Amino acid sequence: MPANEDWDPKVLKFIASTVESIRDRVAGIENRMGSFENRMDSMENRMDSMENRMDAGFTAVRGDIERVHLRLDSIERMLSARLDRVETEVSRLRSVVYLLVKDRPELLRLLGETSLS
């Protein structure tokens, strides 16, 4: 290898500038990669946050649906009990009416009945 004084200064400058240029490009690429990674991390965090909010929303909706379902079941039981009472009362009233008019069939015709059953 030749001694340092034998090297052409133009070649040394070229090598040095090329090395600097490569180092700058590598640094630029590293910066862009770091920026890209930061953006990806940020997007990932936002996606996680959105997913958590969606899960919470779905859970809330499921809870609301369950409460509505329970309320509808309660209303159904209440209406069924009331309807049973009404049917019982109507049956009692029919029995009383039939007992009251058994000797007067013309009154049964007014009720839409033609015979005693």
Image (spheres, rainbow, N blue to C red):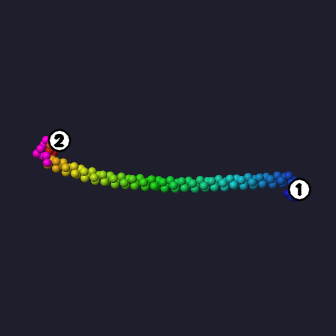
Residue 65 position, x and y percent, is: 41, 53
Can you see residue 115?
no
Q: Using a 10 Å C-alpha cutoff, classify the residue at mark 2 as few (fewer than 14 neighbours), some (14 to 19) or many (20 or more).
A: few
Residue 67 position, x and y percent, is: 40, 55
Q: Is residue 63 left or right of residue 104?
A: right
Which element carries disc 1, helix, strand or loop? helix
Cα separation, mark 1 vs mark 2, equals 135 Å
Q: Residue at x 19, y 51 (%)?
A: 92
N-term-proximal mark, 1 vs 2: 1
Residue 39 position, x and y percent, is: 62, 53
Q: Nearer the viewer, mark 1 or mark 2?
A: 2
State the quadrant of the N terminus.
bottom right
Q: Using a 10 Å C-alpha cutoff, classify the residue at mark 1 as few (fewer than 14 neighbours), some (14 to 19) or many (20 or more).
A: few
User: Can you tell which mark lies on residue 110?
Assistant: 2
In the image, farthest residue toward the right: 5
Q: Is residue 17 left or right of residue 95?
A: right
Residue interval drawn in magenta: 100-106
Can you see residue 78?
yes
Which element carries disc 2, helix, strand or loop? helix
Q: Residue at x 75, y 55 (%)?
A: 23
Q: Is residue 91 left or right of residue 25?
A: left
Q: Residue at x 77, y 52 (%)?
A: 21
Residue 4 magenta-highlighted? no
State the quadrant of the C terminus.
top left
In the foreground, 46 or 113:
113
Q: Amino acid at mark 1?
A: Asp
Q: Amino acid at mark 2?
A: Leu
Q: Is residue 28 left or right of residue 79?
A: right
In the image, farthest residue toward the left: 103
Residue 104 magenta-highlighted? yes
The residue where tag 1 is placed is: 6
Residue 48 position, x and y percent, is: 55, 55
